Image: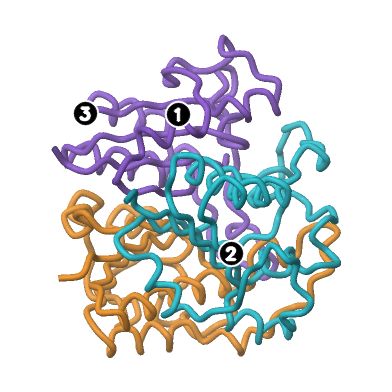
Chain colours: A purple, B cyan, C orange
Amino acid sequence: MSESVSLVLFSGTDDKLHAAATIAAGASAMGRPVNVLVQFWALDAFRKERIALDHGLAFDAVRPGSTTATVPAGSLPWAETFRQAKELGDVQIRACSASMALFAIDPSELDPLVDDVCGIASFFLDVGDGSLVFI
Amino acid sequence: MSESVSLVLFSGTDDKLHAAATIAAGASAMGRPVNVLVQFWALDAFRKERIALDHGLAFDAVRPGSTTATVPAGSLPWAETFRQAKELGDVQIRACSASMALFAIDPSELDPLVDDVCGIASFFLDVGDGSLVFI
Amino acid sequence: MSESVSLVLFSGTDDKLHAAATIAAGASAMGRPVNVLVQFWALDAFRKERIALDHGLAFDAVRPGSTTATVPAGSLPWAETFRQAKELGDVQIRACSASMALFAIDPSELDPLVDDVCGIASFFLDVGDGSLVFI
Protein backbone atom coordinates (compact mmCIF):
# COMPACT_ATOMS: atom_id res chain seq x y z
CA MET A 1 0.00 0.00 0.00
CA SER A 2 1.23 3.49 -0.82
CA GLU A 3 2.24 5.83 1.95
CA SER A 4 -0.42 8.23 3.18
CA VAL A 5 -0.29 12.00 2.88
CA SER A 6 -1.68 13.91 5.88
CA LEU A 7 -2.55 17.60 5.70
CA VAL A 8 -3.11 19.94 8.62
CA LEU A 9 -5.16 22.81 7.18
CA PHE A 10 -4.67 25.93 9.26
CA SER A 11 -4.97 28.80 6.77
CA GLY A 12 -8.33 30.01 5.53
CA THR A 13 -7.54 32.01 2.40
CA ASP A 14 -8.72 30.76 -0.99
CA ASP A 15 -5.24 30.49 -2.52
CA LYS A 16 -3.85 28.27 0.26
CA LEU A 17 -7.01 26.16 0.39
CA HIS A 18 -6.73 25.77 -3.39
CA ALA A 19 -3.10 24.66 -3.04
CA ALA A 20 -4.17 22.19 -0.33
CA ALA A 21 -7.01 20.78 -2.41
CA THR A 22 -4.66 20.32 -5.37
CA ILE A 23 -2.16 18.41 -3.20
CA ALA A 24 -5.00 16.24 -1.86
CA ALA A 25 -6.25 15.54 -5.41
CA GLY A 26 -2.73 14.87 -6.73
CA ALA A 27 -1.93 12.46 -3.90
CA SER A 28 -5.31 10.76 -4.23
CA ALA A 29 -4.84 10.38 -8.00
CA MET A 30 -1.52 8.63 -7.32
CA GLY A 31 -3.32 6.08 -5.13
CA ARG A 32 -2.32 7.45 -1.74
CA PRO A 33 -4.66 7.62 1.23
CA VAL A 34 -5.12 11.28 2.27
CA ASN A 35 -5.96 12.43 5.82
CA VAL A 36 -6.96 16.05 6.31
CA LEU A 37 -7.29 17.76 9.72
CA VAL A 38 -9.08 21.11 9.44
CA GLN A 39 -8.37 23.65 12.15
CA PHE A 40 -8.39 27.38 12.96
CA TRP A 41 -9.07 29.70 10.00
CA ALA A 42 -9.45 26.80 7.58
CA LEU A 43 -12.19 25.34 9.79
CA ASP A 44 -14.04 28.63 9.64
CA ALA A 45 -13.91 28.43 5.83
CA PHE A 46 -15.47 24.95 5.88
CA ARG A 47 -18.68 26.22 7.52
CA LYS A 48 -21.66 25.24 5.39
CA GLU A 49 -22.78 28.83 4.99
CA ARG A 50 -19.35 30.23 4.17
CA ILE A 51 -17.62 27.57 2.08
CA ALA A 52 -18.70 29.14 -1.22
CA LEU A 53 -17.86 32.72 -0.18
CA ASP A 54 -14.74 34.70 -1.11
CA HIS A 55 -12.13 34.10 1.62
CA GLY A 56 -9.50 36.41 0.23
CA LEU A 57 -5.86 35.71 -0.58
CA ALA A 58 -2.72 35.25 1.50
CA PHE A 59 -0.70 38.23 2.73
CA ASP A 60 1.66 37.78 -0.22
CA ALA A 61 -1.04 39.21 -2.49
CA VAL A 62 -1.55 42.39 -0.53
CA ARG A 63 1.79 42.95 1.18
CA PRO A 64 3.28 46.43 1.15
CA GLY A 65 5.01 46.99 -2.18
CA SER A 66 3.38 44.00 -3.86
CA THR A 67 2.86 44.49 -7.59
CA THR A 68 1.32 41.07 -8.15
CA ALA A 69 -1.85 40.97 -10.20
CA THR A 70 -4.87 39.85 -8.21
CA VAL A 71 -5.92 36.27 -8.84
CA PRO A 72 -9.66 36.13 -9.58
CA ALA A 73 -11.40 34.32 -6.71
CA GLY A 74 -13.68 32.49 -9.17
CA SER A 75 -10.66 30.67 -10.57
CA LEU A 76 -9.99 28.95 -7.24
CA PRO A 77 -12.95 26.62 -6.60
CA TRP A 78 -11.10 24.67 -3.90
CA ALA A 79 -14.20 23.03 -2.36
CA GLU A 80 -14.98 21.46 -5.73
CA THR A 81 -11.39 20.19 -6.00
CA PHE A 82 -11.71 18.58 -2.55
CA ARG A 83 -14.95 16.91 -3.75
CA GLN A 84 -13.13 15.52 -6.79
CA ALA A 85 -10.24 14.34 -4.60
CA LYS A 86 -12.73 12.35 -2.51
CA GLU A 87 -14.21 10.78 -5.65
CA LEU A 88 -10.74 9.85 -6.91
CA GLY A 89 -9.69 7.83 -3.88
CA ASP A 90 -9.46 7.55 -0.12
CA VAL A 91 -9.65 11.10 1.29
CA GLN A 92 -10.84 11.67 4.87
CA ILE A 93 -11.53 15.22 6.06
CA ARG A 94 -11.80 15.71 9.83
CA ALA A 95 -12.49 18.81 11.89
CA CYS A 96 -10.09 19.44 14.80
CA SER A 97 -12.05 19.16 18.05
CA ALA A 98 -9.97 21.83 19.82
CA SER A 99 -10.66 24.35 17.05
CA MET A 100 -14.37 23.45 17.09
CA ALA A 101 -14.42 24.48 20.76
CA LEU A 102 -12.27 27.58 20.21
CA PHE A 103 -14.54 28.92 17.46
CA ALA A 104 -17.71 27.56 19.10
CA ILE A 105 -18.69 25.67 15.94
CA ASP A 106 -21.30 22.91 16.07
CA PRO A 107 -20.75 19.88 13.79
CA SER A 108 -24.09 20.60 12.08
CA GLU A 109 -22.66 23.92 10.83
CA LEU A 110 -19.93 22.22 8.77
CA ASP A 111 -20.12 21.45 5.05
CA PRO A 112 -20.72 17.75 4.26
CA LEU A 113 -17.16 17.62 2.87
CA VAL A 114 -16.14 17.19 6.53
CA ASP A 115 -16.52 13.53 7.51
CA ASP A 116 -16.21 13.82 11.28
CA VAL A 117 -14.53 15.51 14.26
CA CYS A 118 -11.36 14.23 15.92
CA GLY A 119 -8.55 15.20 18.27
CA ILE A 120 -4.87 15.59 17.44
CA ALA A 121 -3.79 12.26 18.99
CA SER A 122 -6.41 10.38 17.01
CA PHE A 123 -5.23 12.21 13.86
CA PHE A 124 -1.66 11.03 14.49
CA LEU A 125 -2.86 7.42 14.44
CA ASP A 126 -3.76 7.99 10.77
CA VAL A 127 -0.55 9.90 9.95
CA GLY A 128 1.54 6.78 10.62
CA ASP A 129 4.77 6.76 8.62
CA GLY A 130 3.42 8.97 5.85
CA SER A 131 4.08 12.61 4.99
CA LEU A 132 2.74 15.34 7.27
CA VAL A 133 2.12 18.73 5.66
CA PHE A 134 1.05 22.00 7.37
CA ILE A 135 -0.75 24.52 5.17
CA MET B 1 11.22 2.85 17.31
CA SER B 2 8.58 5.22 15.97
CA GLU B 3 9.46 7.68 13.24
CA SER B 4 10.40 11.16 14.36
CA VAL B 5 8.45 14.34 13.62
CA SER B 6 10.60 17.41 12.89
CA LEU B 7 9.17 20.92 12.94
CA VAL B 8 10.74 24.03 11.45
CA LEU B 9 9.08 26.91 13.31
CA PHE B 10 9.23 30.06 11.18
CA SER B 11 6.05 31.97 12.09
CA GLY B 12 5.77 33.97 15.28
CA THR B 13 2.05 34.50 15.75
CA ASP B 14 0.27 32.91 18.69
CA ASP B 15 -2.18 30.87 16.59
CA LYS B 16 0.55 29.20 14.50
CA LEU B 17 2.75 28.60 17.54
CA HIS B 18 -0.26 27.07 19.28
CA ALA B 19 -0.86 24.78 16.28
CA ALA B 20 2.84 23.82 16.33
CA ALA B 21 2.81 23.09 20.07
CA THR B 22 -0.28 20.93 19.66
CA ILE B 23 1.38 18.91 16.88
CA ALA B 24 4.50 18.49 19.05
CA ALA B 25 2.37 17.35 22.01
CA GLY B 26 0.27 15.01 19.86
CA ALA B 27 3.33 13.39 18.28
CA SER B 28 5.07 13.13 21.64
CA ALA B 29 1.99 11.53 23.21
CA MET B 30 2.07 8.91 20.44
CA GLY B 31 5.64 8.01 21.39
CA ARG B 32 7.41 9.79 18.57
CA PRO B 33 10.66 11.72 19.03
CA VAL B 34 10.09 15.40 18.14
CA ASN B 35 12.79 17.77 16.83
CA VAL B 36 11.99 21.48 16.67
CA LEU B 37 14.15 24.06 14.87
CA VAL B 38 13.13 27.61 15.83
CA GLN B 39 13.97 30.34 13.33
CA PHE B 40 13.02 33.83 12.16
CA TRP B 41 9.85 35.29 13.74
CA ALA B 42 9.27 32.20 15.86
CA LEU B 43 12.75 32.61 17.38
CA ASP B 44 11.88 36.17 18.30
CA ALA B 45 8.80 34.86 20.15
CA PHE B 46 10.96 32.43 22.17
CA ARG B 47 12.94 35.27 23.79
CA LYS B 48 12.77 34.96 27.58
CA GLU B 49 11.28 38.42 27.96
CA ARG B 50 8.72 38.07 25.17
CA ILE B 51 7.52 34.47 25.32
CA ALA B 52 4.53 35.30 27.54
CA LEU B 53 3.50 38.39 25.57
CA ASP B 54 0.73 38.65 22.99
CA HIS B 55 2.24 37.89 19.56
CA GLY B 56 -0.90 38.50 17.56
CA LEU B 57 -2.61 36.24 15.06
CA ALA B 58 -1.90 35.21 11.47
CA PHE B 59 -2.97 37.39 8.54
CA ASP B 60 -6.09 35.23 8.12
CA ALA B 61 -7.54 36.86 11.23
CA VAL B 62 -7.14 40.43 10.02
CA ARG B 63 -7.24 40.11 6.23
CA PRO B 64 -9.37 42.56 4.27
CA GLY B 65 -12.97 41.41 4.38
CA SER B 66 -12.43 38.95 7.22
CA THR B 67 -15.46 38.49 9.40
CA THR B 68 -13.86 35.95 11.71
CA ALA B 69 -14.30 36.50 15.41
CA THR B 70 -11.04 37.27 17.18
CA VAL B 71 -9.60 34.37 19.13
CA PRO B 72 -8.73 35.49 22.68
CA ALA B 73 -4.94 35.41 23.09
CA GLY B 74 -5.31 33.99 26.60
CA SER B 75 -6.79 30.81 25.13
CA LEU B 76 -3.57 30.01 23.27
CA PRO B 77 -0.91 29.32 25.93
CA TRP B 78 1.45 27.67 23.43
CA ALA B 79 4.59 27.88 25.61
CA GLU B 80 2.80 25.83 28.28
CA THR B 81 1.79 23.25 25.64
CA PHE B 82 5.43 22.96 24.55
CA ARG B 83 6.40 22.41 28.21
CA GLN B 84 3.85 19.62 28.49
CA ALA B 85 5.06 18.08 25.21
CA LYS B 86 8.58 17.92 26.68
CA GLU B 87 7.26 16.22 29.82
CA LEU B 88 5.32 13.69 27.74
CA GLY B 89 8.28 12.40 25.77
CA ASP B 90 11.41 13.12 23.76
CA VAL B 91 11.06 16.71 22.48
CA GLN B 92 14.18 18.71 21.57
CA ILE B 93 13.87 22.44 20.81
CA ARG B 94 16.84 24.06 19.07
CA ALA B 95 17.43 27.63 17.95
CA CYS B 96 18.62 28.09 14.35
CA SER B 97 22.14 29.55 14.43
CA ALA B 98 21.65 31.58 11.24
CA SER B 99 18.54 33.25 12.66
CA MET B 100 20.36 33.92 15.96
CA ALA B 101 22.93 35.91 13.96
CA LEU B 102 20.32 37.62 11.77
CA PHE B 103 18.33 38.87 14.75
CA ALA B 104 21.46 39.40 16.91
CA ILE B 105 20.06 37.24 19.71
CA ASP B 106 22.37 35.86 22.41
CA PRO B 107 21.60 32.33 23.73
CA SER B 108 21.17 33.78 27.23
CA GLU B 109 18.15 35.76 25.96
CA LEU B 110 16.19 32.62 25.04
CA ASP B 111 13.56 30.95 27.21
CA PRO B 112 14.74 27.71 28.91
CA LEU B 113 12.34 25.81 26.63
CA VAL B 114 15.12 26.10 24.04
CA ASP B 115 17.68 23.32 24.63
CA ASP B 116 20.51 24.55 22.43
CA VAL B 117 21.57 26.23 19.18
CA CYS B 118 22.31 24.35 15.95
CA GLY B 119 22.75 24.78 12.21
CA ILE B 120 20.51 23.45 9.46
CA ALA B 121 22.84 20.57 8.47
CA SER B 122 23.00 19.37 12.07
CA PHE B 123 19.20 19.60 12.25
CA PHE B 124 18.89 17.36 9.18
CA LEU B 125 20.86 14.64 10.97
CA ASP B 126 17.97 14.45 13.44
CA VAL B 127 15.26 14.62 10.76
CA GLY B 128 16.38 11.28 9.35
CA ASP B 129 13.55 9.42 7.62
CA GLY B 130 10.83 11.10 9.66
CA SER B 131 8.30 13.77 8.77
CA LEU B 132 9.45 17.35 8.17
CA VAL B 133 6.89 20.09 8.79
CA PHE B 134 7.26 23.84 8.15
CA ILE B 135 5.04 26.13 10.22
CA MET C 1 19.89 6.03 -1.39
CA SER C 2 18.78 8.71 1.04
CA GLU C 3 15.16 9.75 1.16
CA SER C 4 14.20 12.74 -0.94
CA VAL C 5 12.94 16.06 0.41
CA SER C 6 10.19 17.70 -1.66
CA LEU C 7 9.23 21.33 -1.21
CA VAL C 8 6.07 23.02 -2.45
CA LEU C 9 6.94 26.72 -2.59
CA PHE C 10 3.78 28.80 -2.32
CA SER C 11 4.88 31.97 -0.50
CA GLY C 12 6.72 34.75 -2.29
CA THR C 13 8.27 36.81 0.51
CA ASP C 14 12.05 36.95 0.88
CA ASP C 15 12.14 35.51 4.40
CA LYS C 16 10.12 32.38 3.51
CA LEU C 17 12.04 31.90 0.25
CA HIS C 18 15.26 32.21 2.25
CA ALA C 19 14.04 29.59 4.72
CA ALA C 20 13.10 27.33 1.80
CA ALA C 21 16.49 27.77 0.10
CA THR C 22 18.26 26.96 3.37
CA ILE C 23 16.25 23.75 3.77
CA ALA C 24 17.04 22.80 0.15
CA ALA C 25 20.76 23.48 0.70
CA GLY C 26 20.82 21.64 4.04
CA ALA C 27 19.07 18.57 2.59
CA SER C 28 21.28 18.63 -0.49
CA ALA C 29 24.42 18.87 1.64
CA MET C 30 23.26 15.76 3.52
CA GLY C 31 23.11 13.85 0.23
CA ARG C 32 19.34 13.92 -0.23
CA PRO C 33 17.66 14.48 -3.61
CA VAL C 34 15.56 17.66 -3.44
CA ASN C 35 12.42 18.29 -5.56
CA VAL C 36 10.98 21.79 -5.57
CA LEU C 37 7.57 22.70 -7.04
CA VAL C 38 7.17 26.48 -7.40
CA GLN C 39 3.63 27.82 -7.45
CA PHE C 40 1.51 30.91 -6.79
CA TRP C 41 3.35 33.87 -5.22
CA ALA C 42 6.66 32.01 -5.15
CA LEU C 43 6.41 31.46 -8.91
CA ASP C 44 5.94 35.18 -9.39
CA ALA C 45 9.18 35.78 -7.44
CA PHE C 46 11.07 33.38 -9.76
CA ARG C 47 10.41 35.56 -12.83
CA LYS C 48 13.72 36.44 -14.49
CA GLU C 49 13.08 40.16 -14.16
CA ARG C 50 11.91 40.04 -10.54
CA ILE C 51 14.05 37.41 -8.85
CA ALA C 52 16.64 39.95 -7.62
CA LEU C 53 14.06 42.48 -6.42
CA ASP C 54 12.89 43.04 -2.85
CA HIS C 55 9.83 40.81 -2.26
CA GLY C 56 9.11 41.96 1.26
CA LEU C 57 8.71 39.94 4.43
CA ALA C 58 5.96 37.73 5.82
CA PHE C 59 3.00 39.20 7.71
CA ASP C 60 4.77 38.39 11.00
CA ALA C 61 7.15 41.29 10.34
CA VAL C 62 4.46 43.90 9.86
CA ARG C 63 1.54 42.57 11.90
CA PRO C 64 -0.37 44.96 14.12
CA GLY C 65 1.55 45.41 17.36
CA SER C 66 4.76 43.87 16.03
CA THR C 67 7.86 45.29 17.60
CA THR C 68 10.26 43.08 15.65
CA ALA C 69 13.22 44.80 14.07
CA THR C 70 13.12 44.72 10.27
CA VAL C 71 15.46 42.19 8.70
CA PRO C 72 17.55 43.87 5.98
CA ALA C 73 16.50 42.45 2.59
CA GLY C 74 20.12 42.35 1.43
CA SER C 75 20.87 39.73 4.08
CA LEU C 76 18.51 37.25 2.43
CA PRO C 77 19.99 36.34 -0.97
CA TRP C 78 17.77 33.28 -1.39
CA ALA C 79 18.27 32.88 -5.15
CA GLU C 80 22.03 32.53 -4.55
CA THR C 81 21.38 29.92 -1.85
CA PHE C 82 19.23 27.93 -4.31
CA ARG C 83 22.11 28.14 -6.84
CA GLN C 84 24.51 26.76 -4.24
CA ALA C 85 22.06 24.01 -3.30
CA LYS C 86 21.99 22.92 -6.96
CA GLU C 87 25.81 22.85 -7.06
CA LEU C 88 25.93 20.79 -3.85
CA GLY C 89 23.77 17.94 -5.10
CA ASP C 90 20.63 16.78 -6.86
CA VAL C 91 18.15 19.69 -6.69
CA GLN C 92 15.36 19.95 -9.29
CA ILE C 93 13.23 23.10 -9.44
CA ARG C 94 9.98 22.86 -11.38
CA ALA C 95 7.28 25.44 -12.09
CA CYS C 96 3.70 24.34 -11.38
CA SER C 97 1.80 24.26 -14.69
CA ALA C 98 -1.51 25.32 -13.11
CA SER C 99 0.10 28.40 -11.55
CA MET C 100 1.82 29.23 -14.87
CA ALA C 101 -1.65 29.39 -16.44
CA LEU C 102 -3.21 31.27 -13.52
CA PHE C 103 -0.57 34.01 -13.60
CA ALA C 104 -0.22 33.87 -17.43
CA ILE C 105 3.55 33.32 -17.17
CA ASP C 106 5.48 32.02 -20.20
CA PRO C 107 8.38 29.59 -19.46
CA SER C 108 10.78 32.04 -21.14
CA GLU C 109 10.02 34.58 -18.39
CA LEU C 110 11.38 32.33 -15.62
CA ASP C 111 14.87 32.51 -14.13
CA PRO C 112 17.22 29.71 -15.30
CA LEU C 113 17.09 28.34 -11.74
CA VAL C 114 13.80 26.75 -12.85
CA ASP C 115 14.53 23.50 -14.72
CA ASP C 116 11.13 22.84 -16.26
CA VAL C 117 7.35 22.95 -15.87
CA CYS C 118 5.24 20.10 -14.50
CA GLY C 119 1.83 19.23 -13.08
CA ILE C 120 1.01 18.13 -9.56
CA ALA C 121 0.57 14.42 -10.42
CA SER C 122 3.98 14.35 -12.11
CA PHE C 123 5.46 16.09 -9.04
CA PHE C 124 4.05 13.36 -6.78
CA LEU C 125 5.95 10.74 -8.77
CA ASP C 126 9.16 12.41 -7.51
CA VAL C 127 7.90 12.83 -3.93
CA GLY C 128 7.77 9.06 -3.48
CA ASP C 129 8.26 8.04 0.15
CA GLY C 130 10.23 11.17 1.06
CA SER C 131 9.28 14.23 3.10
CA LEU C 132 6.80 16.72 1.67
CA VAL C 133 7.06 20.31 2.93
CA PHE C 134 4.76 23.26 2.16
CA ILE C 135 6.30 26.72 2.52
Q: Which of B81 and B60 is in front in this view?
A: B81
Which of the two marks, 3 or 1, is nearer to us in this view? Answer: 1
**Residue A80 location, x and y as percent?**
37, 28
Q: Nearer the viewer, residue A103 or B94?
A: B94
- The residue pinned by badge 3 equals A89
Q: Is residue C26 left or right of residue C86?
A: right
Determine the CA span between mark 1 and mark 2.
24 Å
**Residue A135 location, x and y as percent?**
48, 48
Secondary structure beneath disc 3?
A: loop
Determine the CA span between mark 3 and mark 1.
21 Å
- Circle 2 packing at 10 Å, graded few (<14), some (14-19), many (20+), is many
Determine the CA span between mark 3 and mark 2.
37 Å
- For disc 3, the chain is A
**Residue C42 location, x and y as percent?**
45, 66
Q: Is residue A40 left or right of residue C96?
A: right
- The residue pinned by badge 2 equals B93
Q: Which amino acid does label 2 sit on?
A: Ile
Q: Residue at position x 13%, y 37% from top?
A: A1
Q: Is residue C86 above or below residue B134?
A: below
Q: Residue at position x 36%, y 31% from top?
A: A82
Residue C69 numbered tag: none
* Furthest residue toward top: A108
The answer to whether the residues at label 3 and label 1 have Cβ atoms under 8 Å apart is no
- For disc 1, the chain is A
Q: Is residue C1 left or right of residue C60?
A: left
Q: Which amino acid does label 1 sit on?
A: Ser
Q: Residue at position x 36%, y 64% from top?
A: C38
Which image quadrant for residue C28?
bottom left
